[in-house]
Amino acid sequence: MTSLTRFHGNQRVEARLLWFVTFVTLLVSAGFAEEPLDGRLDTEAPEQQPASTYPEIGGPTSVRGQIEEDEGVRKARERMPGFRDALEPWFAWKRRIKEKNGLELSFDYSALYQGASASLTDEDDAAVGVIRGYGRWTAVGRGTENTGILVFKVENRHRLGTELAPSNLGFEVGYLGITGTLYSDVGSVLTDLNWQQRWDGGRTGMIVGRYDPNDYLDVLGYSNPWTTFSNLSVLVNTSIALPDASAGIGFGHWLNDQWAIGVTADDANGVLSEVGFFDHGWEFYTSGEIMWTPEREHRYTKNVHMMLWHVDEREDAGVPQSHGVAFGANWLVGEKWLPFARAGWSDGGAPLMNATLTAGVLHRVGERADLLGLGFNWGDPSDDGLRDQYSGELFFRFQLSENLALTPSAQLLVDPANNPDEDQIWVLGLRVRLAL
């Protein structure tokens, strides 16, 4: 009970918790109590707008996936229509560019603050801002099902007045994982620069260049650290030796309208902050997946899949070869509920966990784009000397306008693997995102 005593004795954390509970109560009350605006009603949940029938298996965090998700939110009623209306000339210009040149452009700015109830050091809070510019240029076959598309994304990730970034806060408190996924302070980086080709009437696709393989395999529609959860263990399967953005090649193919397969091979030593091409030797991360969905256009929200993966020994980094199997599923129920589950087992010391289970649900609140999420994870670390670890996260995304959202969250870290003196650690957070 050491952590509870320290928690109640820490006035800063008590203030954070009081602020969080009050804020969430107000947000949830507003989400359920507001009257419809001018009768504008979207009968389909904005986060569950069906993806296109393209064969690419890119997830919500891929360039295409993020653009589609933001367009889905724009179909929902909003609280501040004047905010979006003031930016209409900007969005109209983007539409003209897309229609004339086949170029889709998008920009966003996200900021995340997190504070922890305990730490191994004096640092217990973290904040980072991220500005991103990304797009897709259909250079070949525009208007057809067989296209060639250049995909790009650049980012700047910077700390906001704290000594830590949220991506490091978990390790600072003794948690084996990341409480603020993608919110690092690496500065300016090139995250995507790849060519995506599709042929055979859109049934077969290829990606080659620099990309994050996690955006294209083991994909579930609930998983997006910019708009849903922040905890890595809830978002992805941590029994996989998760590679960073790197050089690689992948293929996807629809066997029919329900079954799809995908494979990828990538530089196992890829680092987000460095743009290289197998600079540390020909050591590969490889994976293959088979996926079933009742209809191609619902591959995000009604999806069951199994993936096998392998990573070579990384000699310079001193990381052994590892391999494993991962399962994932989420299923949209009644246009409002999206339950999800993940499981994975692995052998070797490359991933964080050798076994993990995750389960949770998203719920669309009312008729707006407000979103409530709850997720839980159990993990057995790949280091046999560490204890099993548990974590949970609750968030409420409050959509102020179709392109502006506030998301308070609370994470409970139970038995943090690298902090045997603490049984429970709370991490409270607030995220803001502006999409342009």
Image (cartoon, rainbow, N blue to C red):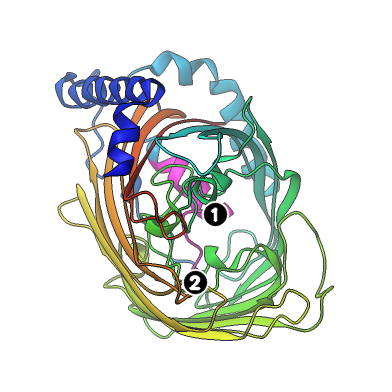
Looking at the image, residue 157 lies above or below residue 190? above
- Does residue 173 appear anywhere in the picture? yes
Residue 370 in sight from this viewpoint = no
Relative to 139, is 94 above or below?
above
Tell which of 77 and 387 is nearer to you: 387
* Residue 114 image position (x, y, % from top left): 47, 34
Which secondary structure class fits the magenta region best?
A: helix
Residue type (three-letter) at the residue carrying disc 1: Arg
What distance separates the C-alpha of mark 1 from that of mark 2? 14 Å
Magenta residues (range): 57-72
Query: Residue 70 colored magenta?
Result: yes
Question: Where's residue 50, x and y in %?
Answer: 35, 55
**Residue depicted at 26% across the width and 73% down the height:** 294
Badge number at residue 223: none
Q: How many marks?
A: 2
Q: Which circle marks residue 64 in the picture?
A: 1
Left or right, 27 with reference to 216: left
Task: Name the side, left or right, on which 139 lies relative to 165.
Answer: right
Q: Earlier in the sequence, mark 1 or mark 2?
A: 1
Q: Which residue sits at x=55%, y=79%?
A: 349
Front of the two marks 1 and 2: 2
Q: Nearer the viewer, residue 295 or 403?
A: 403
What numbered label is drawn on residue 217? 2
- What residue appears at the point 46 percent right and 47 percent down from the top-left corner? 179
Q: Residue at x 49, y 74 (%)?
A: 383
